[in-house]
Image (spheres, rainbow, N blue to C red):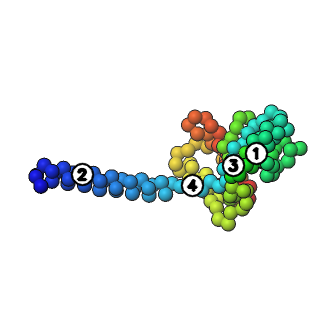
Amino acid sequence: MGMKKLLLLVALLGVIQVGGIAATRFAKLQEDQKMELGAFSVSLSVKDIAASRAFYEALGFAEAGGNQDQNWLILRNGTTTIGLFQGMFEGNLMTFNPGWNAEAKNLDEFTDIRELQRQLVASGIELTTKADESTTGPASLTLSDPDGNAILLDQHR
């Protein structure tokens, strides 16, 4: 093997090795930063809850919770969950429920919303509203992504 080919091979192996180290560090960083946010749904601010319910039922959604007389419903189609809320908030929200799985069943173990809040703040995320750190149990917080999309973390227990 010529000297140029040997140097090229050594250089290539060095790049692969450095790339492997970088990939390993990146994977570790992602693992360290993983947040368990709980069940995900989209919460829709609707004008007419009965009309919205009929529309989403035509798309195959069925009632999974809520109370239409109180102007809120939870609808599910397979593993997809949406909430319909009339007159409760402006705009639509991405909603996460710490402590629940996708069927709104309690998880045995979960990260409390106050711990999630500490992690978010430590990461430099600005919160719109905060959970009271002196409490336990149900609490919520809100934030917006860089494009202004609203996110609600709503812990029910």
Q: How much space separates mark 3 and mark 4, taking CA atoms?
A: 20 Å
Instruction: Rate crowding at label 2 as few (under 14), some (14 to 19) or many (20 or more) other CA atoms within 10 Å.
Output: few
Residue identified by numbered label 4:
35
Residue 140 located left or right of residue 12: right
Residue identified by numbered label 1:
60
Instruction: Rate crowding at label 3 as few (under 14), some (14 to 19) or many (20 or more) other CA atoms within 10 Å.
Output: few
- Quarter residue 127 falls in: top right
Residue 69, position in %: x, y? Answer: 89, 44
Please, what secondary structure does the residue beneath circle 2 have?
Answer: helix
Residue 102, position in %: x, y? Answer: 69, 55
Kindly report which numbered mark, 3 or 1, lies closer to the viewer in this rendering: 1
Kindly report which numbered mark, 1 or 2, lies closer to the viewer in this rendering: 1
Please, what secondary structure does the residue beneath circle 4 have?
Answer: loop
Point out which mark residue 12 bears.
Answer: 2
Amino acid type, residue under disc 2 in the picture = Leu
Residue 34, position in %: x, y? Answer: 53, 55
Residue extending furthest toward the left: 2
Point out which mark residue 80 bears.
Answer: 3
